[in-house]
Amino acid sequence: MFTETTLQSMTIPIIKMDSLALGHSTENLLNCAVESNIRYFVYVSTADVICGPDPIYYGAENTCMVPKKPVLGPYASSKYEAELRVVKGNGLSLRNGIGRLSTVILRPTLLYGEEDPFFVSQIIKLAKTSPNNCLPRVDNVFTRAQVTYVGNAAWACLKAKDRLRLDPGIGGEEFIITDDTPVQDPFDFVKPYLDQVNCRVSDRPLPYWILIIFLELVLFLVILVRPLYAIDLPEKYNPRRVRYLCTTFFFNRNKSTLRLSYAPFYTPDDSKKRSLQYYSKL
């Protein structure tokens, strides 16, 4: 039986890879699993692989297609390439000639919580480098984000592994992972975490389309100058990130509930309390 102690005692190796290497690295891990006679392979992808230019309302695995132009570009494309390799690896014969490899793909929504280096942590960094420690709010009429606490994503990994042992028939399938964190405006979501570090969100919003045009112009100038002078675009000027945060994407987890017996381990209050402790130390 899995418990909170199980989650706390998990040691999860984190392998950082660039986008081009991700697919090949995943294939190497699959080969290692086969050579080591490991029967269960849980691949943590991301719901970003199905996030394109259009909003998603209550999206499901069978209703959301992989877009030709994902909003997060090469990052999302590389994760999908790795997914395809995981699907192909399902059913491979193990080295011992007895068992077969069973794989499953999890697609959690944007993660927050302990060890988060990309979402709330980057927003805190942006706020701290802004005038008066104030994060500019961006207005795009109706913007809602669905985020998942990292502890619940870890719990989903355990449930997926356990389910693979009982039902190899789910092998090669993908599952969207969410929790009960309220679907809300992303700027309202990060406000409590900014308050913890003496930052805030602006009361007056920036118009979304004016900001996007400005950021695209900055990107265009950087591309023009780059052949003559090495320059990197600061993350806060990345138009992909702004589009991502200001476009509505939320999903249902019915398939994960029915096929993986997954339900969030941590409540929204627990998730927020634990996350506040982590972000307050940044």
Image (tube, rainbow, N blue to C red):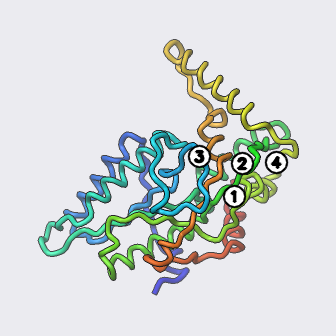
Question: In the image, is residue 23 above or below residue 93?
Answer: above
Dot 4 or dot 1, earlier in sequence: 4
Q: Could you classify mark 2 by the number of other residues whose Cα lies within 10 Å: few (under 14), some (14-19), or many (20 or more)?
A: many
Q: Secondary structure at mark 4?
A: strand
Say what amino acid the circle numbered 1 marks: Tyr
Q: Secondary structure at mark 2?
A: helix
Q: Residue 231, labelled with which disc?
A: none
Give the distance between the C-alpha atoms of the residues marked 1 and 3, in whole angstroms. Answer: 31 Å
Q: How many marks?
A: 4
Pointers 2 and 1 in contact (CB under 8 A)? yes
Q: Could you classify mark 1 by the number of other residues whose Cα lies within 10 Å: few (under 14), some (14-19), or many (20 or more)?
A: many
Q: Could you classify mark 3 by the number of other residues whose Cα lies within 10 Å: few (under 14), some (14-19), or many (20 or more)?
A: few
Give the distance between the C-alpha atoms of the residues marked 2 and 1, in whole angstroms. Answer: 9 Å
Give the distance between the C-alpha atoms of the residues marked 4 and 3, in whole angstroms. Answer: 26 Å
Q: Residue at x 34, y 76 (%)?
A: 164
**Which residue is under mark 3?**
54
Dot 2 or dot 1, earlier in sequence: 2
Q: Residue at x 51, y 75 (%)?
A: 7
Q: Residue 124, labelled with which disc?
A: 2
Give the distance between the C-alpha atoms of the residues marked 4 and 1, in whole angstroms. Answer: 16 Å
Dot 3 or dot 2, earlier in sequence: 3
Dot 1 or dot 3, earlier in sequence: 3
**Which residue is under mark 4?**
201
